[in-house]
Amino acid sequence: MNNFHFSLKTEIFAGRGSVRRQYRAWLLGHRALIVTGRQSAKLSGALEDVCAVLEANHIPYVIYDGISENPDVTQVYGGVAVALANQSDFVIAIGGGSPMDAAKSIAWATASMVAQEDFFDRKPTPRDAVLPIVAIPTTCGTGSEVTPYSIITHHRLMTKVNISSPRFFPSVALLDARYLESMPKHVLCDTALDALSHAIEGAYSPRANRLSLAISEEALEILIPELIRLAHGAFVNLSQLQYASLLAGIVIAQAGTGLVHAMGYPLTCHKGIPHGRANGILLAGYMDYMSESCEQLTERLFNAANLQGPDELQALIDLLLETLHCSREAPTEEELLRFSHDPLRLEMVQRYRTMPSTENVMDIYRTGF
Ligand code: NAP
Ligand code: FE
């Protein structure tokens, strides 16, 4: 067996009613801070379940619902202020990747007294205190419920920064597919594409290992048939999508993301294209590019996906975006050229065994649009 390291510090409970049934496992303190977006926690029904458990167990809580898509430092520190004012000693994140990621930074900044002006410069150390985190996903894409990453938008640099620490792994993840039912169709599509990109990028990462690769394949086997059904307007199995998103999250927790995420950030920050959609647009061009240096692995991934190759993947993604009315306004050639430099500066890309060139990046952008 090859040497490898695999770490997953999160206890996972999956299944209908898991929030109420498994309450003993996730009451991790005496005063809870609930971190969420404007509506998803309420619409999904997760907030009602969480509050019912907290009230039945006489645990005071406060709700901070100030997290929007692509959360920034101001939103994080809004949560820190609420946590400090209420002496919260554990954090419950309900929502998609945005509230879950923000909750991790709030848990760190609160417990380790990180000053707002130091937020991006002071990297979390393994010894930094972080309030215990419970994660309850209401989308099926980021896998943030099982990753040590908190992705926060840096407005001045017009990019997203990955703040990460092993202590950011949520202590408990509670998965109930009923919470996905209220998702608008375009969010379902965008987030499933994010999960797809995690399974694929994680597989190509130099940090991938035998076990993470097997999990990538399992995620692809589940995701692609669901995406095909979604693209044809047929019934999709939300519980399968939630499971695949979890698997893909476990993959990136080990292996990290790569060029697709790095290239997607400018599309989100400059053009407002949602995170998962930005990744999905770039995936087929990326696999085509990677097939030059990783032929066998690419074949293995397409086998798991039961797709012929990049053209069939691109056709599936095109159909998906069209069926679900997910627009993709093409950036101009000048914009793409501007976007093409930043991804190559990111550590997640500099790890590649063969560094992509600006021309490779441009080709992948052009294929997607
Ligand atoms: P999101 O930004 O959390 O949510 C997108 C939209 O969907 C929001 O308007 C949200 O509403 C709504 N929504 C979510 N669940 C819903 C539900 N069940 N019913 C109705 N509306 C719902 O989307 P996301 O794609 O899950 O997260 C994207 C973020 O995660 C990005 O910032 C990305 O960079 C990050 N990310 C993190 C990791 C990681 O490992 N940590 C990995 C990949 C991506 P509300 O505003 O009401 O919540
Ligand atoms: Fe992602």
Image: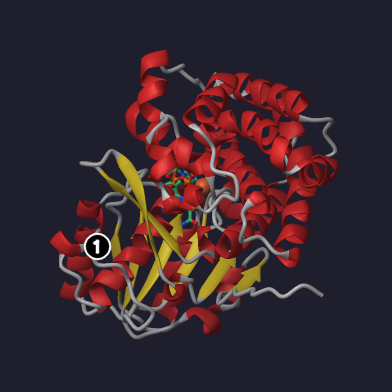
Q: Is residue 74 above or below residue 283?
A: below
Question: In the depicted view, which residue is nearer to us: 66 or 155?
Answer: 155
Question: In the depicted view, which residue is nearer to us: 63 or 157?
Answer: 157
Left or right for 16, reference 108: right
| Residue drawn 49% across the image and 47% down it | 349
Q: Quadrant of residue 113?
A: bottom left
Question: Which quadrant is home to the C terminus?
Answer: top right
What is the three-letter code of the residue carrying label 1? Gly
x, y percentage for residue 322? 61, 19
x, y percentage for residue 288? 69, 31
Q: In this view, does 349 lie above or below 8?
A: above
Left or right for 250, reference 116: right
Per the image, the residue denoted by label 1 is: 79
Q: How crowded is mark 1: few (under 14 residues within 10 Å), some or many (20 or more)?
A: many
Left or right for 299, reference 253: right
x, y percentage for residue 334? 37, 16
**Residue 332 in sight in this render:** no
x, y percentage for residue 227? 71, 35
Question: Which quadrant is home to the N terminus?
Answer: bottom right
| Residue drawn 73% across the image and 37% down it | 291
